[in-house]
Image (spheres, grey):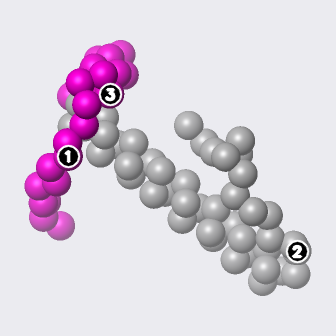
Amino acid sequence: MGSTVLSLRIDGELLERLRRHAARRGMTVQDYVVRTLVRDDFDERFHAAVDETEKFYGAEPRHADPADRVT
């Protein structure tokens, strides 16, 4: 799988927060942002799979609750 460039315009305060979060993990801002996006995408797909499984077995599907989010 190849890679593609994504350019974002963000304010300085947000960039500084991203830099601090990335630095705490020993990562670049780019790696931190990509990892966060991948993790969020996984969380969404995981919750959708759980809902589908519950529907299949006849259980009432639970709706995504931000408090359930894995971080």
Q: Secondary structure at mark 3?
A: helix
Magenta span of residues = 1-28
Q: Position of residue 32 (x, y in %)?
A: 31, 35
| Amino acid type of the residue tagged 2 in the rendering | Ala
**Label 2 Cα neighbours within 10 Å, binned few <14 / some 14-19 / many ≥20:** few
The residue lying at 88 percent from left, 81 percent from top is 58
Give the position of the N terminus as an image quadrant.
bottom left
Q: Nearer the viewer, mark 3 or mark 2?
A: 3
Quarter where residue 10 is shown:
top left
Q: Nearer the viewer, mark 2 or mark 1?
A: 1
Residue 34 as seen in the image, left or right of residue 63: left
Residues at marks 3 and 2, CA–CA distance in whole angstroms = 41 Å
| Amino acid type of the residue tagged 3 in the rendering | Leu
58 shown above or below 48: below
Give the position of the C terminus as an image quadrant.
top right
Q: Are marks 3 and 2 in contact (CB under 8 Å)?
A: no
State the residue position of label 1.
Answer: 8
Residues at marks 3 and 1, CA–CA distance in whole angstroms = 12 Å
**Label 1 Cα neighbours within 10 Å, binned few <14 / some 14-19 / many ≥20:** few
- Report if residue 69 lies within the magenta region: no
Q: Earlier in the sequence, mark 3 or mark 2?
A: 3
Residues at marks 2 and 1, CA–CA distance in whole angstroms = 41 Å
| Amino acid type of the residue tagged 1 in the rendering | Leu
3 shown above or below 70: below
State the residue position of label 3.
Answer: 14
The residue lying at 55 percent from left, 60 percent from top is 44
Q: Secondary structure at mark 1?
A: loop
Looking at the image, which is closer to me, 69 or 50? Answer: 69
The residue lying at 75 percent from left, 63 percent from top is 63
Q: Position of residue 51 (x, y in %)?
A: 72, 71
State the residue position of label 2.
Answer: 59
Q: Position of residue 70 (x, y in %)?
A: 60, 42
